[in-house]
Image: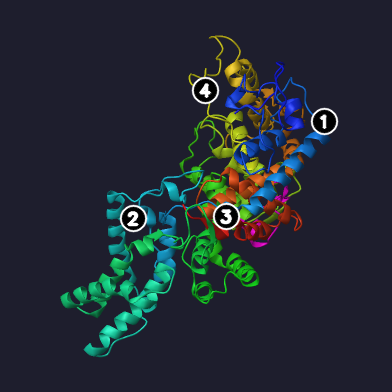
Amino acid sequence: MILGVCTISGRAASDPFLDQYCAACHNTKLKTGGVAFEGLPAAGAGQNADLWEKILRKVRTNEMPPAGAPVPAPQIRHEFVIQTEDALDQEAASNPNPGSPAVHRLNRSEYANAVRDLLGVQVDITSLLPPDDSGYGFDNIGDVLSLSPALLDRYISAARQVSELALSREASRRKVLVCDPTTKASESPCARSILTALARRAYRRPVTNADLKPLLGFFAAGRRKSDFVTGIQAALRALLVSPEFLLRVEHDPATSPSGTVHRISDLELASRLSFFLWGSISDEELLDQAEHGTLSDPAVLEHQVRRMLEDPRSEALVRNFAGQWLTLRNLTGAVRSSRLFPEFDKRLRDDFQCETELFVADIMREDRSVVDLLSANFTFLNERLARYYGISGVRGDEFRYVDLTDNRRGGLLGQGSILTVTSFPTRTSVVLRGKWILENLLGEPPPPPPPDVPSLPQPDDGRKPVSLREQMEAHRAQRACAACHAKMDALGFALENYDAVGKWRSTEAGEPIDASAQLPDGTSFVGPEGLKKALLDRRDEFIGAFTAKLMTFALGRGLEWYDQPALRKIGRAAERDRFRFSSIVLGIINSTPFQMRRTP
C-alpha cells in the first residue's frame, strides 16, 4: 500500500492531517493503493482499525508523505502519531482481540527438549525428525506445523527409539521407574503410578482414568510378551505419539459464544510460558502452581518468569529465538571461496556462532538493556577470534568476556556471524545487509522485488571493473528498483568496511572503501559507527521490532493489526525500566495476546 501525497485535489478527508497530506491521492476518485480516506471514521471509532494501523506505521516511519511531496513539520507529525495511537489503544482496551492461536504441534526442537526433561534422555533429533516448516521467520508457528501421515510415521519411529533408550540407560531408567514391583500383584499399581507421573508431565495437566486406560492397555500387552519393563516401554512408546503429548491444544469454554474473548486457564498459561522460555514442558514447580490456580496471580507469575529465565533451560531462547531472529542458523551452510577467503573454515564459523550466542545470552542472563544489542562495548572472544579481529590481549581457546576499545566490533553489527550470513560466497552484499537490518532491527521488511528485475550492470571486456557502489547506483537509477534500494543500499554501504567474512578492510580492488550513506529522509552517516548512531536515534523502532519478533516467537503465530496496541503498551512499560530484557519478556507474558484468546 502506498500512502502518499499527489497534486490532484480531492474532497476533504475526515481527519485534518489526512485531509492536508493524504487525501489528494487517497480519495474515492483515485484510490491510490486501493485506499480512499474520504469519510473514513476517526481512529478509535471502532471501525477500520486495521487501516488506521497501516496509516500510523507509514506516518511514523516517514514513508508517508513520500519524497518530493509536502511534508508535515516534525511536531505536527508527532502529534498525529500520538493522538492516533491513543485513540487506537483506548479502543483496544475496551474491545480486546487477542487472536485465536492454532493447535500447535511440537516442532522437533520442542520434542527433543520435552523428551530430555521428561525422561532424562538426550537424542540426536536431526536424525529422528525432518526440519520443520517456518513462518514469520520462526519454526514454531502453529499454522504451518502440520502433521502429515509421513511425519507421523517419523514420530512413531522416534518414539520407539526414545522409549528403548530411556529404559536402557541407568540414569534415565531411574527417572522413569519411580517404583519397583516385587510381586506380580504389585505390578499393576506400580505401572499406574509410573504412567500417571509421566503422563501428567507429558500432557501438561492432571491425568484422568480416561487418559490412563489406553496406556495401561499397552502396558498389559507388552507385559504379556515379556516382562514388566517391556510393558512400561510399550506404554511409553504410546504416550510419546499421543496427540495429548504431540499437540498443544487450548480449549474454549463450551459456553463461550463465537467471537468472545476469555482468559486462558492456568494450565494453558503454564504451557505457553514453558514453551516460550524453555522450548519444553513445564517442570514440577510450574505445573503445581498451575494446578492450584495460583499461576495467574501477578506476583506468582513474575516470580516464576524470573526463576525460569535464570534456569539453564532458558538457553533455548538463544538457540531457537535468537538463532532464527538473527539468522544464525544460516551460518552452518555458509561457504566461501578458499581462494578469496583462505582463513574461513569450520572453526572460524563455529567461533562466529559462539561469539554471538554468548553475547545474546549475556544480555538475557544479566538482564541488560536490549539496546545493548546495538551499542555494547563488549563481546565474547577466544584467542583465535580475537586475533582474526585484530584485538590483542586474549589468550587461550576458551571464550571469555572482553571489553572493547575499538568501536568497529561493538554490538551485533560488528560480529562476524551477522556479516557472514548477509554476504554472498564471493563478495559482500549491500542489499542483503540492508535488507537484514530493515527486517530484523527496524521491523520494516521491504516488499518482494518486482518480476524480471535486471541484474547488476557489468562492464564490457577490457574496461576497468566498476565498483559495487557504481553498480548499485546504476541499478537504483532504474525506476523499478529505486524505491526499495534507496533505503536498503544506504544501510548496507555503511558496513562495506567488513568483507564477506567479517574482516575489516580499508580498500577493495585497490580503491578506498566509501562507507558513506544517506537515507531518503536526508539522514547521513559514515561507516559502522555512524550507522549504529542512526539506528540508536531510531531506538523506538528497534525496540518495537525486537518486541514484535519476540512476541511472534512467544505466541507461535504471526502478529496482526490488532496486536499493535499490546506492542505499544509493552514498549512504554519497558522504557520505564530502561528496556531491560526481563521487562520486555514480562510485558509480553502479561499482555492480552499472551494471557487471553478469542473463541473462533
C-alpha distance separating marks 4 and 2: 40 Å
The stretch of residues the image draws in magenta is 361-379
SS at badge 3: helix
Say which amino acid is labelled 1. Ala
Q: Return the residue at label 1.
A: 73
Say few, some or many: other residues with alpha carbon within 10 Å of mark 1 (under 14 / 14 to 19 / 20 or more).
few
Name the mark nearer the viewer: 1 or 2.
1
Kindly indicate whether the residue at mark 2 contacts the one at mark 4 (C-beta within 8 angstroms).
Answer: no
**Residue under numbered circle 3:** 593
Image position, residue 281 (x, y; %)? 46, 66
- Residue 300 figure quarter: bottom right
N-terminal of the two: label 3 or label 1? 1
Kindly report the distance in space between the C-alpha atoms of the residues bearing marks 2 and 3: 33 Å
Residue at point 73% right, 52% down? 572
Residue carrying label 2: 128
Residue 87, quarter of the rendered image: top right
Mark 4 vs mark 2: give the one in front: 4
Secondary structure found at label 4: loop
* Residue 529 in view, yes or no: yes
- Cα separation, mark 1 vs mark 2, equals 59 Å
Q: Nearer the viewer, residue 397 or 420?
A: 420
* Residue underneath mark 4: 450
Q: Earlier in the sequence, mark 4 or mark 3?
A: 4
Disc on the earlier residue, 2 or 3? 2
C-beta proximity under 8 Å, tags 4 and 3? no
- Mark 4–mark 3 Cα distance, whole angstroms, equals 35 Å
Say which element carries label 2. Answer: helix
State the image coordinates of residue 50 (x, y, percent, origin top left). Answer: 60, 39
Looking at the image, is mark 1 or mark 2 earlier in the sequence?
1
Q: CA distance from mark 3 to mark 1?
A: 35 Å
- Amino acid type shown at disc 4: Pro
